[in-house]
Amino acid sequence: MSESSEEFQSDFFEGTEKLLEVWFGTRSGNEGPKKCDLRVIRRATWESMLKLVKCEIISQMSNEDVDAYVLSESSMFISKDRFILKTCGTTTLLCCVEALLYIVNQFTGFDKVRDVFYSRKNYMRPELQDKPHSSFEEEAAALDTYFKDGNAYCLGSINRDCWYLYTLQGHHINRADQTLELIMQDLDPRVMSIFTQAESNSALEATRKSGIDTIYPGAKIDDFLFSPCGYSMNGLIKGDHYMTIHITPEAQCSYVSFETNFPHDKYDQVVSTVMRIFRPSKCVATVFASKDSVASRAVRHFDDLAVQGFQQKELQMCRFTEYDLTFALFAKAPS
Amino acid sequence: MSESSEEFQSDFFEGTEKLLEVWFGTRSGNEGPKKCDLRVIRRATWESMLKLVKCEIISQMSNEDVDAYVLSESSMFISKDRFILKTCGTTTLLCCVEALLYIVNQFTGFDKVRDVFYSRKNYMRPELQDKPHSSFEEEAAALDTYFKDGNAYCLGSINRDCWYLYTLQGHHINRADQTLELIMQDLDPRVMSIFTQAESNSALEATRKSGIDTIYPGAKIDDFLFSPCGYSMNGLIKGDHYMTIHITPEAQCSYVSFETNFPHDKYDQVVSTVMRIFRPSKCVATVFASKDSVASRAVRHFDDLAVQGFQQKELQMCRFTEYDLTFALFAKAPS
């Protein structure tokens, strides 16, 4: 191997996040003596759980509905009955599932897992991942040891850009819930340079210079600029609504993820705004919407979604028990 | 291993078919000195190609538009510009692709592959398959050596019932084309017994007793009853429209496939008729429809398709360049 290819390797960072969302409930539907609220769990307990994942809390922000943590590798959101953990690099997210279920059972009144969603894009360099993250088959098998009757899916092209999902869905929830995720790769280097300490003096400066603060004006923002480069932010919008952005700016592995559960009845504007800010060459967009969500119509008509300057290369839809899911792959249109 | 489990294994037959459909064309769009028609290729040439697949022709029937062959393992349909080969068991379908492309180039005026579709359900016993059919990854890699820029997909649950597709799609075709496939498993043994020589004296008797002749009344039928059991049929409806049914009746591995390119603007009736005849416990339904097909609306609204006595357990849709695809999994409703 030449020196330059070694250099290339040393600069590599796997931005691709593992994303776990778990909803808790009670078998009886009633609250017992212990409180049914994940926020009763102490930060020190979360910290010990995160050791299993090989990451740590670097910042925290809360509103009435959700505790949002910026992690050394991505983010964690804790609300009453919903746990979200998103971690990148070579973290071992699924190593925490057993501990999570134990902690929730020990400290809260929840005695039931209602819904589980585990997802990620295909890794750029799967061979660098630690067990059980070497392959999606291995990840699904690990999840099968904790949950019964989960289903594993692959959306997009198995042999190109794809997105994996493991889900376990309970019965009717009467819950208006929706999640948009944009996973962007090969981004404009001029935009990416904003997220380096060489170009921005602070996270706030990067947030403003890039226009991230314009996506949901009024959101309460907790942002972090890594040294020498890299950026994470959590935003609390209102109620139990969050947004989160994670940026790996290195040219040879540039990666940006955007995620929000803010309800939209159309996704055109938010998707266009985010893609205009980051200028990716390609972008995977996924939208989940429960039957009761305002987004439930939008998720079924995602083919109408046009983003200026981009071609929709792939479009898939899945109907699940309580959610509809749309997967789309956008690629920069030839100019 | 006990004697009974050995006996079980010896009775196993992989009904699951590999299905390849290739459309040919010319680069210039015009016909040269050689005829642009796959039917100029002689039967002896097809026979030598099929040796590579490890199967042979056992019967032939033609109409003005298509030559339909019943094979020792499933079927082959040759029309002007479309080649369809469907083979079950441990046949090595993909071993013929190089020969197919050579033969078409040698004997016809076609110099271009316009579209490719290779698909199959997950095998019951993948470990019994020969190369390159041991895994879908291997099959996709084999296809990649012949075709450029093909995409590989997995519909349904990777870890349960799923259906694989490799496709390469050309540019706009202005072709009204559609294919319905029903892949049924765990079927009613009383229905399956019809397709044994113990119960039926001839293929014709099995065709009539089961009601297969009622699916498309008036179709020209070429049917075959294997010894001691098993059944194949090709039907020519009118024009370039075919149907084909293949039945593995053994209780421990019962499998029936139904396929047709007959155009329907709704699929309720044909799907219900076929499922009422065969009484499967589960059924994968796939429908491809080109933009110009009368089925193009139906394929987008497949969620409306209800089959009495069955639950729609999975529903996925894919938008491709020229085709829409719907995948549905039906399971017998609890009685």
Image (cartoon, coloured by chain):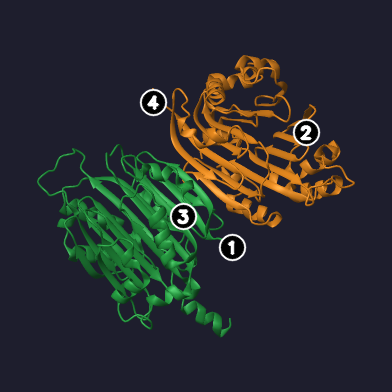
Chain colours: A orange, B green
Dot 4: element = loop
Same subunit: marks 2 and 1: no
Same subunit: marks 4 and 2: yes
Dot 1: element = loop
Disc 3 to disc 4, C-alpha distance: 33 Å
Q: Which chain letter matches label 2?
A: A
Label 4 sits on residue: A334
Of badges 1 and 3, nearer the viewer stands 1
Of badges 2 and 1, nearer the viewer stands 1
Say whether disc 1 or disc 3 marks the residue closer to the N-terminus: 3
What is the three-letter code of the residue carrying label 2?
Ile
Above or below — where is A208 with respect to B277?
above
Q: Residue at x 27, y 67 (%)?
A: B70
Disc 2 to disc 3, C-alpha distance: 42 Å
Q: Residue at x 47, y 79 (%)?
A: B10
Disc 4 to disc 1, C-alpha distance: 52 Å
Q: Which chain letter matches label 3?
A: B
What is the three-letter code of the residue carrying label 4?
Pro
Q: Position of residue B306 (x, y in %)?
A: 48, 53
Of badges 3 and 4, nearer the viewer stands 3
Residue extending farthest left: B33
Of badges 4 and 1, nearer the viewer stands 1
What is the three-letter code of the residue carrying label 3?
Trp
Q: Nearer the viewer, residue B291 or A281?
A: B291
Same subunit: marks 4 and 1: no
Residue A332 visible in the snapshot: yes
Say whether disc 4 or disc 2 marks the residue closer to the N-terminus: 2
Label 2 sits on residue: A57
Disc 1 to disc 3, C-alpha distance: 24 Å
Residue contact between numbered discs 1 and 3, judged by CB atoms under 8 Å = no
